[in-house]
Image (cartoon, rainbow, N blue to C red):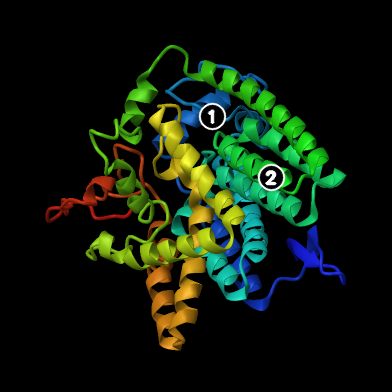
């Protein structure tokens, strides 16, 4: 059974109700869950960043929310507490410590289906869920001892709750849910604040336009609670890194320079987002820029459609990304790959909407077949590869920590990419 919105006889949407998924969605949920569980059961070894975080989980007191942490780690305080508690209860082994990310990945599948059904009609919702369920990056980060996968879970929970408020109004139950999820999320996910800010702005604007002053006052109170909770988590997190600025030096490439120095920096990063972490880069030796082109075209079509037809929904999907870029410009939070993983569902929503629009406008089944093939080929091949061969192991270390070879970087856009030399590692890790 799937968490979604159902309609009463009067036509109003009841949030957080349970309905059986459509056969196609049920199959995708089963496949997505199976991929994540198989990756989890492969019990691959820790890679460098996981080992660094593991050291802080194993040696610190459970409720030590502040730092500094060893090995230049910075972790959402509640995520750290949960992992330390799991280690004490279940033991110090990979199955135990990767359990929370796995549960988050499985929950994300259900939440993605619920959000997609609220935003789009049947086929577009199904395509969005398929993109998410089959994504090799989503499978991997659902089984890594880092909070990137659970960032996605938190983002989807916030988005679903916000959509419930928009359809039902700010009922007492939804107000409590909105307040509680936001207050907890800021301690569990660094990126939750971007989703909360977008949700708060959209809900407040809609309440103001509709002159629902009591709802607006309640939203201001809820938002104040979010800010207070975020302030506490921010203070705790700042102590984790102490005076050492090495982490900021490492992530310097993910902070945009002044616009006049490199006006193409943001477009390059947005285009590269379709390769990592959206998985549209195509298996080598296909030029990743060409392989990602169908997804980029569908994303742009979906963007134009949603901005013109559903501006409030567009704001919910687009504003978090704009806020992340603003934070990167201010050198507060890097904009790159896995650190912006929580934006993946929004991108998939836009791509699915655009693909459905192109399919409908063309009026030809062949166009739909070509779109499906172009959008799903790479993730499907990677899923099969990791099921049968490498099990998501990280044999080499990209200097930026990406699961991509060094030559596949944002700089490949608007310039000639450096393809690997003969014998150089070609893995997509």
Query: Which type of secondary structure does the marked residue at label 2 adopt?
Result: helix
Vertically, is 62 above or below 345?
above
One can see residue 65 in this view: yes
User: Residue 1: image x %, image y %?
Assistant: 75, 66
Query: Which residue is at a point 52% across and 40% down the rendered structure image?
Result: 145
Which quadrant would residue 213 be assigned to in this image?
top right
List the residue tagged with mark 2. Answer: 203
Which of the pair 312/396 is nearer the observer?
A: 312
Tell me if mark 2 has few (under 14), some (14-19) or many (20+) residues whose alpha carbon lies within 10 angstroms of its own. Answer: many
User: Residue 99: image x %, image y %?
Assistant: 62, 45
Marks 2/1: CA distance?
29 Å
Q: Please state if 2 lies on the left or on the right of 113 as rendered.
A: right
Contact check, label 2 and label 1, Cβ < 8 Å: no
Query: Which residue is at a point 29% across and 55% down the rendered structure image?
Result: 427
User: Residue 226: image x %, image y %?
Assistant: 69, 30
Which of the pair 129/137 is nearer the observer?
A: 129
Vertically, is 64 above or below 179?
above
Which disc number belongs to residue 50? none
How many numbered circles does the render carry? 2
Which disc number belongs to residue 75? 1
Q: Nearer the viewer, mark 2 or mark 1?
A: 2
Vertically, is 9 above or below 213?
below
Which of the pair 30/339 is nearer the observer?
A: 339
One can see residue 176 in this view: no
- Mark 2 or 1, nearer chain start: 1
């Amino acid at each position: 059974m799937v968490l979604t919105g159902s309609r009463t006889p009067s036509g109003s949407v009841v949030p957080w109700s349970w309905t059986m998924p459509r056969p196609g969605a049920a199959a995708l949920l089963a496949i997505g869950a199976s991929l994540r569980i198989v990756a989890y059961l492969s019990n691959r070894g820790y890679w460098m960043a996981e080992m660094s975080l593991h050291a802080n989980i194993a040696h610190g007191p459970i409720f030590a929310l502040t730092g500094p942490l060893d090995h230049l780690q910075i972790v959402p305080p509640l995520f750290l507490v949960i992992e330390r508690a799991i280690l004490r209860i279940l033991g110090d082994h990979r199955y135990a410590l990767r359990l929370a990310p796995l549960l988050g990945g499985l929950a994300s599948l259900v939440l993605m289906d619920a959000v997609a059904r609220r935003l789009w009609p049947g086929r577009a919702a199904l395509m969005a869920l398929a993109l998410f369920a089959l994504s090799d990056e989503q499978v991997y980060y659902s089984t890594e001892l880092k909070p990137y996968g659970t960032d996605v879970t938190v983002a989807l929970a916030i988005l679903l709750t916000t959509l419930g408020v928009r359809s039902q109004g700010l009922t007492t139950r939804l107000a409590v849910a909105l307040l509680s999820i936001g207050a907890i999320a800021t301690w569990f996910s660094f990126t939750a604040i971007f989703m909360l800010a977008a949700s708060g702005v959209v809900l407040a604007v809609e309440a103001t336009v509709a002159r629902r002053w009591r709802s607006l006052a309640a939203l201001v109170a809820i938002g104040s609670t979010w800010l207070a909770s975020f302030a506490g988590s921010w203070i705790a997190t700042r102590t984790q890194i102490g005076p050492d600025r090495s982490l900021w030096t490492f992530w310097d490439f993910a902070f945009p320079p002044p616009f006049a120095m490199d006006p193409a920096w943001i477009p390059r990063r947005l285009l590269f987002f379709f390769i990592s972490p959206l998985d549209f880069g195509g298996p080598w030796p296909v030029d990743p820029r060409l392989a990602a082109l169908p997804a980029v075209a569908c994303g742009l079509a979906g963007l134009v459609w949603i901005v013109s037809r559903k501006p409030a929904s567009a704001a919910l999907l687009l504003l978090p990304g704009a806020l992340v870029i603003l934070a990167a410009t201010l050198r507060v939070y890097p904009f790159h790959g896995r650190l912006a993983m929580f934006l993946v569902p929004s991108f998939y929503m836009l791509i699915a909407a655009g693909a459905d629009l192109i399919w409908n406008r063309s009026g030809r089944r062949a166009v739909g077949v070509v779109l499906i093939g172009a959008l799903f080929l790479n993730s499907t091949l990677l899923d099969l590869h990791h099921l049968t061969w490498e099990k998501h192991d990280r044999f080499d270390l990209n200097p930026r920590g990406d699961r991509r070879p060094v030559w596949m970087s944002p700089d490949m856009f608007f310039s000639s990419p450096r393809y690997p030399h003969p014998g150089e590692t070609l893995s997509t890790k």
